[in-house]
Image: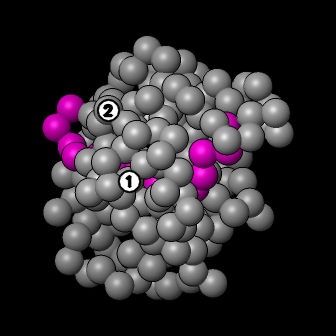
Amino acid sequence: MKIGIDVSQIAYEGTGVSVFLRKLTEGLLKSDGKNEYVLFFSSLRRDFQFSIFNFKSNLNVQVKKFKFPPFLLDLLWNKLHILPIEWLIGDVDLFITSDWTEPPVVKAKKATILYDIIVYKYPSETDKKIIEVQKRKLRWVKKESKIIFCISESTKKDAMEVLGIEKDRLRVIYPGV
């Protein structure tokens, strides 16, 4: 199987999202010698260094780097929902999205990581722009993601109660150390 992962949020070192995504990706690449991986990374000003992963090179991994600014991907993917991810990274069987954008796919199945739904539960504590972007992304997640990985039972419960996502699409993957 060929698995694509949006690792763009790894660029924001020190954040919970960055640490979770880096450790999850690193764990997959270390333990899985069977599947192929394509890592999608996009940032206008930040760079991605494959060497951040703590293991020897894995021949089953490709990195596809782009310099799209986050606002452009929000426009293309969350608002207009155009430019399928496969047009940028090639065909994949599964594409895993993370925190900021939700690209359309041609044939791939989609999974996403849901960290929280603060934009719905505590909007007064969140920047208005972040609320808008996250709500647009979550609408597509609800429509298109076959599996939603939640970082806690609490997030899973919120996804069911607040977003109305069916329990059978939700899986809990706790953050590692």
Asked whether, in this view, residue 147 is left or right of residue 103, the answer is left
Magenta span: 106-119
Instruction: Quadrant for residue 68, please give it.
Output: top right
| Position of 175 relative to 163 (above/below) | below
User: The N terminus lies in which quarter of the figure?
Assistant: bottom left
Nearer-the-camera pick, 9 or 127: 127
Quick check: can you spot residue 74? yes
Q: Which residue does the numbered mark 1 point to in the structure image? A: 148
| Position of 71 relative to 61 (above/below) | above
Number of numbered discs overlaid on the protein picture: 2
Q: Determine the secondary structure under disc 2.
A: helix
Nearer-the-camera pick, 18 or 34: 18
Q: Residue at x 38, y 53 (%)?
A: 148
User: The C terminus lies in which quarter of the figure?
Assistant: bottom right
**Residue contact between numbered discs 1 and 2, judged by CB atoms under 8 Å:** no
Nearer-the-camera pick, 17 or 56: 17
Colour option used: one colour
Asked whether, in this view, residue 32 is left or right of residue 79, the answer is left
Q: Which residue does the numbered mark 2 point to in the structure image? A: 143
Q: Residue at x 52, y 26 (%)?
A: 136
